[in-house]
Image (cartoon, rainbow, N blue to C red):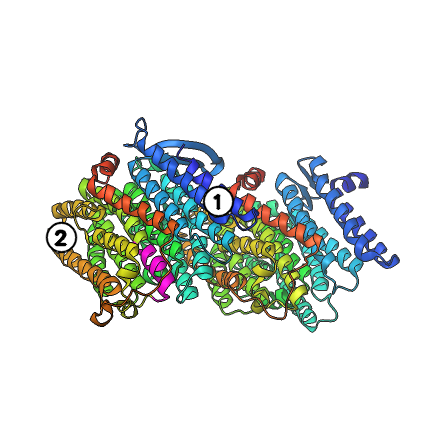
Amino acid sequence: MSYLELLKLAAPETIVVVTALAVLTIGLTTTRARGLCPIVAALGIATAIATPLVLPLHANLFGGMLVISPLNSLFKIICLVLALVTVPLASSEKSLRNPGEYIAVLLLGAVGLMLLVGSEELLMIFIGLELLGLSLYVMAAFDKSDVRSAEAGLKYFLFGSTASAFTLFGISFVYGMSGTTALAAIGLKLAAGPVQPLLAVGIVMTLIGFAFKIAAAPFHLWAPDAYQGAPIPSAAFIASGSKVASFVVLGKIVLVGFAPARGSADWHAMLAGWSPVLAVLAALSILLGNFVALAQTNVRRLLAYSAVAHGGYTLLGIIAGGRDGFSATLFYTSIYAVTLVGAFAIIGVVRRESGGDDLQNFSGLVARSPFLAGSMSIFLLSLAGLPPLAGFFGKFYLFSAAFRAGGNHGLLWLVAVALFGSFVSLYYYLIVLKVIFVGKKPETITSGYASDLFSRITVTVLAAAVLFLGIMPQTLAARIFASLP
Amino acid sequence: MIAWTIYITFAGAVVLLVLPRGFAHWIALVTAIAGFAISLATFFCDDIDLTHFTTVVRVPWVPALGMNYHLALDGISLTLVLVTGIAAVSAVLFSWDVDQRQNEFFFWLLLVVGGSYGVFLSADLFLLFLFYELVIVPKYFLIAIFGSTNKEYGAMKLTLYSFFGGALVFLGIIAIYVSGGSLDVNQLAQFQFTPQLQSWAFPVLFLGFAVLAGIWPLHTWAPTGHVAAPTAGSMLLAGIVMKLGAYAALRVAMNLFPQGFQMWRTWIAVLAVVGIVYAAAVALRQRDLKFVIGYSSVSHMGFVLLGFATANVFGVSGSVLQMFSHGVIGALLFAVAGRMIYRRTHTRELDALSGMNLSRALPFAAFAFVIASAASMGIPGFSGFAAEITILIGAWKSYPLAVWITGIGMVLVAAFTLRALKRSFFDVDLATASAAPPEMEPITIPEKLGAGLLMFATLAVGLYPKFLLDRIQPAVEAMRFLK
């Protein structure tokens, strides 16, 4: 294995790293960094998106440390697309003082995402998690003039590093029990015997680490502050890219690595393993996220609690397992990420124009900008799971996969909880829409919103994507399904 | 061809979004008339098989999950498509001079209409559910933005009730999909679901749909929603949306789970009879004219559910006829109360109206209201009579007791209708009777046209119900839940 070969197979990562360095240099040397950096970053990411298409379909380096498979390539592309749509948000965010640095950190975070989804080996996954985490901590605390941003950064850092410690602790146990860190090999090793208590500790620890990452209750406490306090593009990136990659990896770890320790989450027939643990996390997240979201008056905080609930729904697919369940999870988390970036883009515009992101700042938005109001309703209604938007199909796919799994509809209870949760969720999404469409335009604001071109294009593209994936879901769903082994 | 009702309506909605204001009501009218004309043309087209749920369009949609874009037509769905067309045209006519955010108003309105066409024509469960849920949010905006009395509360209540029903339906449909392995209604109608599944999935599914049909005790969204909605909104709610629930309960829940239906149908009959009597009694005590009509809608929809519960050809055909009939009558009642009266007097309180000598000030409105009340009470010669007598004949075979109790309900219906009629139009105070009637803006031409269309429909069906029944009955006979 020559270095040239390695660099070729890791071309997307390499390109993004080089772009990050280039952006950093530009940011340090020129005075027009604000205009130039986003363009360079966007070009770099676009190139990186194209590269997986010319790489070989399958490759496996160093026992799973870098794996190229249809699934990994697809999600590398999705993560890069999410990074790409975050870049214009960063460029229109005027409060960020050093756009070069910020975008470079964002690109490093994107590399972390790619390492995460491109690896099937625990140590490499951990390195990816850390690279991603460190970038996100910096991004969350980037707005030095805002004390909330500092709070968000610190909270996210403290919780995140604790979670990493849990994960590493869990990984060490799993390594101790199986003697290997490659997922496929762990799966084979564990299949041999019954689940040892020590292994159970290792599995639970690893899961807790990921539960922090996807903000599943009761490990969600960082999310509301991070979503509310962090600069808009950082919050969007935390809610989208980081979540997608975490679900991909979590799915791979439990469905491949821990497959023999699955247990059962069926009602009346629970068996110890990771699936009942995840089922409890999912049910808690759905109930707690939705109910607490009802009481929120800040839109970003509301989205944070709804994100907790959506994390719960998404877990359903992993609990259901199998090709069907995993692909439902992956579809749902992808469209969720797209939707949330769009919602944050709109919140960014509203925040810049009206000075805040509380519910009252959205009052009468339809009179100020019908375009933003219409797009926001597309995003929120998709989150609520109403047709003809992507979230509707996503929920159908997810819930039917969960219903099908298990003996004699054993997961019916979880599906019922999820349906109940999504019923509750409609209320708070409608409250936001009510404020937007029915609320009075505040006196202080006279003119319409002059949203800049970048945000406008981003929002248009994302809203169109949500609508398109709702009407033609198979364009993405079939691709994900086909890419799963 | 019938599929174009859906496309044209949605196309009209999209056109409304991009076009500048000014033409909005014309575009909406043209769209609604086009949909109505297509359904009417199909109705008079003889060479269409209306006995079976015959495929009109079938295109693979999400092949991996077995979803098809699949539309089909039989006598039942055609009847309901027709009433949708009638209600849509008259609703547009009755909102001719919406003053604020006109484009948006007609956009939401056409989405409700288009989604309803979709539900009535879908032969794929996922597609049906998609259209069914698609109607929810436009209703919310229609009421919350353009409504009147307590509009935000009414809109939210209605939406949450609909969505709650939707969640139950979601569960039922997933159960069907996973156990039956298909989403095609015609294929599933041949599939034998296990009795154990039917015993729990049927009530979940039926109740989920029946929420929208105003089943007692989950009917409370209907009066508040109807009252809060703008006139066109209440016309569509009473005329079409309540039928979505009833239709889907018939097409999906009863058609696919015949054994579950047999297990639970007595309960449906009980709830239906309670609903008929209870809603009529409550209507008798209302002071707001729109509340009276709102509760009368619940009472009339109780007849539909009673007809379903009979599980014989008469009862179920009568139910479908009642859906048509009430769609027309309910729309007409709301049009008179919400538009013709309220716009001119700015009150709907019966006490306030009784002194206004309205029958002389607004003779046309009085005429329309008399016709609508007569139809609503079930006077022979109007569609209400034809439908309710068919249902009661059916019910006599299955639940004779229910017929007796329903008889009390019908007396109550007559009582509150006559009371509302008298108080609103004919309560002439002797002191003011000789004085000149109050000056009021005359009834406009669009209002006359809309009311004329509705009155014609109820009379035509009342005088010659065979016209619809000939198309409904064979389609009902083809369903397998009949005994």
Q: For residue A57, which quarter of the picture? A: top right
Both labels 1 and 2 in a single chain: yes
Name the residue tied to disc 1.
B27
Q: In this view, does A435 lie to the left or right of B87?
A: right
Is B343 contained in the magenta span? yes
Furthest-top residue in view? B47
Q: How crowded is mark 2: few (under 14 residues within 10 Å), some or many (20 or more)?
A: many
Is B118 contained in the magenta span? no
Query: What amino acid is found at the position of numbered circle 1 in the picture?
Result: Ile
Tell me where the magenta segment starts and ends, as one range: B333-347
Q: What element carries label 1?
A: helix
Q: For residue B187, which quarter of the picture? A: top left
Q: Nearer the viewer, residue B248 or A234?
A: B248
Query: What amino acid is found at the position of numbered circle 2 in the picture?
Result: Val
- Magenta stretch: dominant SS? helix
Q: Which residue is drawn at 63% across and 39% down?
A: A70
Q: Position of residue A148 (x, y in %)?
A: 67, 71
Instruction: Give the numbered dot on residue A166.
Output: none
Say if residue A257 shows up in the picture: no
Mark before the other along the chain sequence, 1 or 2 = 1
Quarter the C terminus of chain B occupies: top left
Say if residue A331 shows up in the picture: yes
Q: Kindly identify which chain the residue marked by label 1 belongs to.
A: B
Q: Which residue is drawn at 22% across and 41% down?
A: B317
Name the residue tied to disc 2.
B403
Q: Nearer the viewer, residue B402 or A65?
A: B402
Q: In this rendering, which labeled residue sits more in front, label 1 or label 2?
A: 1
